Structure formats: C-alpha cells, structure tokens
Amino acid sequence: MAKILATIKLFFQTFLNTRLNSFKIKAGNQEEINTAAIGLIIVHHAQSSLLSKRILEHAVINDGKLHAFILAPKSISGLFWFVLSSLFRKKGNTTLPPFAAHIKTSSITITGDKAIDYSQDGILLSTDQLQVDVCKGGLNMVPGQKLDMENKGGSDDVFKIEALPRGDVREELLKRKLPLINHATTEEFKDLFSNLRSSSVTSSVYLVLMFLATLIATLGLFGNSAPVIIGAMILAPLMAPIISLSMGVLRQDRTLILNSSKTIGWGVLLGYICAIFITWLTPLNIANDEILARVRPNLLDLGIAVGSGIAGAYASAKSEISKTLAGVAIAVALVPPLAVSGIGLGWMDWDIFQGAFLLFLTNLAGMVMAAAMTFLFLGFSPFRLARRGILYSLIVVGLVSLPLFFGFMDMVRENNIISKLNGYTNNGVILRDISVRNINPIRLTVKIVADGALDKGQLDIIKEDIESLLGEEVELEVTVALKVY
C-alpha cells in the first residue's frame, strides 16, 4: 500500500513540476520553428510507441519518412485530461491532441537553449544538438506481422504545427512551471477586454432591447404563457454588462465595474418602468402560475444562476461559441423575476415584489460570482489579483443565500407533506391533488374522493387524520369528488 501511495505521489509531483523547454526545430526544407514543448517523440513507424499507435493511421516502415510528435500543453489540467482520455480513446480516432504537433519528413534537427536529454532504445543520452535522418538501405531486417513492407505509403511531408506556441505565447510559457489551468494569452486578453469594455457602456440598442424584452416578458406573465416568456429571454441583452461586471470584479478594474453597474442599473430601471406601466394598464390583478413560480426563490434558483454565469463567461472567452446561447442562459434567470417584481410594485403587493426581487438579486449575484470564477479558471487573472473580488462576491452570495436556504427547506417540507398525503386512503376516502397554499401555518387544498356525500363530522375526522399524519394542525380547503359506479 505504501508503495502504491508513493507511486501516486510521484506521479502527481511529476505533473506539478512540469516545465516547457525551448526548442528550435528544422525539418526538411521548412523554416526553422522556434517553440516551447515538454518534449518530442520521434518514431519511424506507427507501432513504435503508444502515442503513434493511436494517432498514425497510415505509416509504413519503408516510406523513407519519420514521424515527430511535439507535445506543447499550456496547462497541467490539459495534459492530465489528455492522458486520462487516451486510456478510453476509440480505435480509429486519429485526431491529434489539441496541444500536439505532427511532422512527417525524412530529416529533422533539434536544438535547445540547454543540453537535450533524450532516450534511444531505452538508453538515456544527452546532446547539444539532435539530428535524426531516415537513410535508404541503412538497415536490413526481417519484418514482423506489424510492419507493412509492401505498402509504399505517402511520399508527401506533413507539417501540422498550428498548436505550437510561438512569439509572446512561447515566452510566457517558458517563464514559469506549467500552470494548473490554462492561462489566457496576451492576444486573448486584448480581444476579450476590448469586447467587454465596449459591452459595459450603455447604448441605445441595449436600452431598446431591454425595454422590449421586459414588455414581452410582462405580457407573457399576465397571459400565463411560457412560450412568450421564453421569447423575451431570447431578446434580453443582459449578458454583456453582467459578464463585463464579473471581469471587473475579478481584476479589480474600477472603470469596468462602474460602467457595467451603470448599464445594468439603467436596464433594470427601464425594465421596472415598463413592467409597472403595463401593470397599471392591465385590468388583471390575480397572480397566476407563472407569476407565483418566481416569488419563492430557493437554492435551486441559485444553482440556475451559477450555471448561467459559467455559460456566459465561457462563451465570451471562446470565440467559437455563439454568444446568443449564453445570452439565453443569462436571460432565463433575470428577465422574468425582474418583470414579476415590477408587477408586484404595480399592484403594491409587497410579498410578490419582495420574493421576485430576492430572486433577481440572487441570480445577479450568482452569475457575477460564477462568471468571475470561470474567468479565473480560464487564466484571465492571477489569483493574487482576483482573491479580493472573489471574496467579496462570495460574501454577497452567502448573504443572499440565507433566505434561499429557508425557502429550500420550505420546499422540502412541502414535498414531504404532499408525498405523505397524496393517495392516502382511510375508510374508502382517498386524498388526491394535494396543494400546499401556505407552510406556516399549514394550509392545504385537498381533493377528497369518496363513495358518497360527506357531512361536517366526516370532514372533521379526515382533518384529524391528516393532522395525525403530519403531527401538527392544518387548515383545509376541500373539494369533494364522488365515485360513480
């Protein structure tokens, strides 16, 4: 057991102490490649190593070419994930790892800033410059069943080197040990910060879209129509300033925080004005299912907000992901509660306003925290700079989460009540369609299915049975359904 633990410890220490080395690679007639990598694997045939077996689909012994695989991961997590996924790699999947390059040529020369340690046929060697050539007729051998001598193979050289770090990226990777997570490059920083700074500024387009999104959401809530509410979510422009705010919090950028907060504030104010105005114009004043669904927030809503924030930050950092998808995720958790709290103000109903506004604040705080953590994980800020912003966001989320915890416990209690009572049978009476109208004190709406009409005494007995099951007093609103045979 001790030996196994020591092996595991050595394995992880090797990962944590991994550094990239500087290499200059000259292959064939191509220009010299100045890059950084943890190492190279040079083989003559697909069966020569575990990596080449999984990557090379067509490689023969007599094509006059060698294959060089250059491994240049940007983080320990990326390298570890490749090692783990390689164990379950499907046969026939010959795609290169995202951090690897493949060169197929007849001659390759490798030099480094220091001596190059390498292994040849299991023997450890060292040299200042390593040159590997494939010589015609250099070796006579009897091929085994794994070596295809008849197939001549492709004669063209292959240079798949897009993944190799160059320029500033190479210099940044050589300065330190391989980070645990991928650090964003200077180019990625510039592109993302440019977009976030422009997104943090209030624009007429943003205000118009915010007004229309709240208008549609409010009408959809009054109409008790989920499809209309979803349409408002798609239209909502809230993703951009929220993601900008999360980056400002992460990097303690006061300008970004101030501009993003102003933009969010103007959007919220405009949303409230729109929702209140529509509420005054609408003669409906009864809360329906869509409205009531957003006035009792709990920890599940915080989980939705966290997922939305992660989606928004990840989509903003990755150019290949559509920002619209993340925009929908952000809107799912913000526009409906904003509209419901506006309806509560229009009705002067404090309970509806308070519940929906708490949900709105919860979602906003959860998104900012989750997006900031995602940017930290993606390497857009060192931890020493980010820790204050992360701490503040965690404190805010923690404070907001306190009432959510009690809301979640009430939800659990309601589910327990319904599970105990629904389908309960006694003396031919069956309880159906249990609904909890209030939790403290408990007020229930119950459908009682019976063989015949029930008098007041029988209803009192049913009430006593329910109180005995739950262990506390209840108030009942009863609907009686008669069985017809």
Image (cartoon, grey):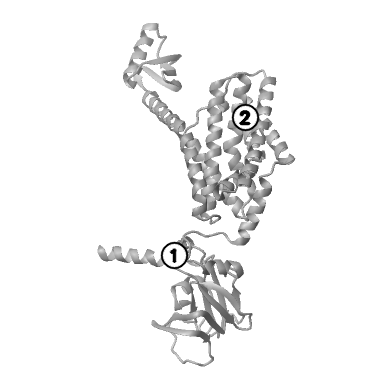
Q: Is residue 480 visible?
A: no
In the displayed structure, 64 sits above or below 445; it is below
Which three-letter amino acid code belongs to the residue tagged 2?
Answer: Ala
Q: Position of residue 46 (x, y in %)?
A: 49, 77
Q: Could you say whether the residue bearing mark 2 is in a helix, strand or loop?
A: helix
- Residue at 53% from the left image edge and 39% from the top image edge: 365
Quarter of the image containing the N terminus?
bottom left
Left or right: residue 463 versus residue 92 is left
Which three-letter amino acid code belongs to the residue tagged 1?
Answer: Val
In the displayed structure, 212 sits above or below 53; it is above
Q: Residue furthest right?
A: 204
Q: Position of residue 144 (x, y in %)?
A: 43, 83
From the image, tell me which residue sits under label 2: 339
Q: Are marks 1 and 2 in contact (CB under 8 Å)?
A: no
From the image, tell me which residue sits under label 1: 83
Q: Residue furthest left?
A: 1
